[in-house]
Amino acid sequence: MLKAFFQTDKGRVRPHNEDNGAVIQITATDVFAIVADGMGGHLSGDVASKMAVDFLTGNFNTYIHENSDVADSLRRLLQDSNNEIYSYSKENPDCQGMGTTVVAVKADEERYILAHVGDSRCYHIKESSVEQITEDHTLVNELVKSGQITSEEAEFHPRKNVIMRAIGTDPTVDIDLYTYNWDAGDYLLMCSDGLSNKVSPTQMEEVMSKDGTLEEKAAELIAFANEAGGEDNISLVLLYNEPADKEGVSS
């Protein structure tokens, strides 16, 4: 059985929340989940993230039913949401240049398929290990990959938040796709950078290893981010591949 929970918080500094997200519990063993972090002038960041989430949730069933290749369905979903947001920004001057990150996952008990654009992340948490599945589409990450700066320098780089790839900012977008197996007892943590910039993998593992509901774990992770400054909006989805012997027990 799969369990999922979405939570968002505007943080301690921002006047409004430009993040968005959703969980669709398709069946007891199938889930579709999204986290989106909007960007743009005025209030257009929250327009972009809401448009992306609305498009993905509103069209997910149609795209999946039309195509047995789930990864390709997710790619088409994100590309078509990109087209919609880009067109809207061209027609509405107040939204010029708006865009959003997206991390979207279709999961069942055996595997998860992930589509990703931007610097929102997905972590696979298994026993005592935390693995970052996604790769940030940021200027700083490109500098790290090319050897111009170290990972340690990247943490404090003044242009850390410069996004190189987003949904809605250009006519087309490259979309990263991943397919992984996972086991009963594993978690996925999907989150905006308001969480990943403030909460370490060690803290993530500490929270997920405790007893408690997904709601309680989400609240504790958000509290960590706010205690560390909470300068950005904070959003996450927790997915839990619940072992059969725990079904019916709070988790």
Image: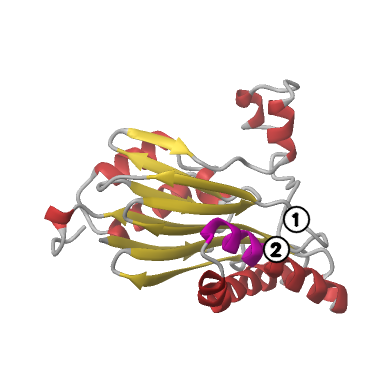
Residue 4 percent across, percent down from the top left: 35, 62
Q: Secondary structure at mark 2?
A: helix
Quadrant housing the C terminus = bottom left
Instruction: Please name whichever residue, 209 or 159, is drawn nearer the observer in this view of the structure.
Output: 209
| Residue 51 tag number | none
Q: Report the disc number at residue 79.
A: 2
Q: Could you tell me if the residues under marks 2 and 1 are in contact, i.e. CB atoms within 8 Å? A: yes
- Judge the density around disc 2: few (<14), some (14-19), many (≥20) Cα neighbours within 10 Å: some
Residue at 79% across, 60% down:
169
Q: How many marks?
A: 2
Q: Which residue is mark 1?
A: 173
Image x and y of residue 239, in percent: 36, 56
Q: Quadrant of residue 247?
A: bottom left
Residue 89 lies in magenta, yes or no? no
Residue type pointed to by label 2: Gln
Q: CA distance from mark 2 to mark 1?
A: 7 Å
Q: Does residue 232 appear in this view?
A: yes
Q: Looking at the figure, which quarter contains the N terminus?
A: bottom left
Residue 74 included in the magenta stretch of the image = yes
| Rendering coords of residue 89 (x, y %) | 81, 72
Question: In the displayed structure, would residue 15 be above or below residue 114?
Answer: below
Element type where label 1 sits in the image: loop
Residue shown at 25% from the left, 47% from the top: 185
Q: Residue at x 71, y 71 (%)?
A: 43
Q: Which residues are magenta?
A: 69-79
Instruction: Report the side of 189 relative to 214 (left or right).
Output: right
